Image (cartoon, rainbow, N blue to C red):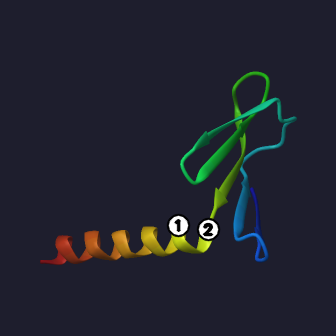
Amino acid sequence: MKINYDREDDILMIETAPGRIDHAEEMGQIIVHFTKDDKPVLLEILDASDFLSLVTKTSLRAKSIEIN
């Protein structure tokens, strides 16, 4: 797995497996790139800093609820 961050465009790219990209699907802030066999090989998270901030806050809230 390879992870790259483009600070200028605020895009986090996660290469999940090697493979040639055939097509992509956009799901909100996330673009998933697939091979011809529909295997996901690359995730692009747009506005990554906002996305990761939201994920972190949600995770912390969930842990707080578990503790209480």
Q: Which residue is mark 2?
A: 48
State left or right for residue 58 relative to residue 39: left
* Mark 2 vs 1: CB contact within 8 A: yes
Quadrant location of the C terminus? bottom left
Quick one: label 1, few (<14), some, or many (20+) residues within 10 Å? some
State the image coordinates of residue 4 (x, y, percent, origin top left): 78, 67
Give above or below for 22 relative to 28.
above
**Residue depicted at x 83% and y 35%:** 21
Residue type, mark 1 in image: Phe
Give above or below for 26 relative to 44.
above
State left or right for residue 36 relative to residue 47: right
Most distant residue in the left direction: 68
Q: Which residue is mark 1?
A: 51
* Helix, strand or loop under label 2: helix
* Helix, strand or loop under label 1: helix
Residue type, mark 2 in image: Ala
Give above or below for 55 relative to 44.
below
**Quadrant in the rendering for residue 14:** bottom right
Q: CA distance from mark 2 to mark 1?
A: 5 Å
Quadrant location of the N terminus? bottom right
State the image coordinates of residue 59 (x, y, percent, origin top left): 36, 70
**Residue depicted at x 70% and y 31%:** 39
State left or right for residue 30 relative to residue 8: left
**Residue depicted at x 76% and y 77%:** 7
**Quadrant in the rendering for residue 44:** bottom right
**Quadrant in the rendering for residue 38:** top right
**Residue depicted at x 57% and y 54%:** 29
State left or right for residue 67 relative to residue 8: left
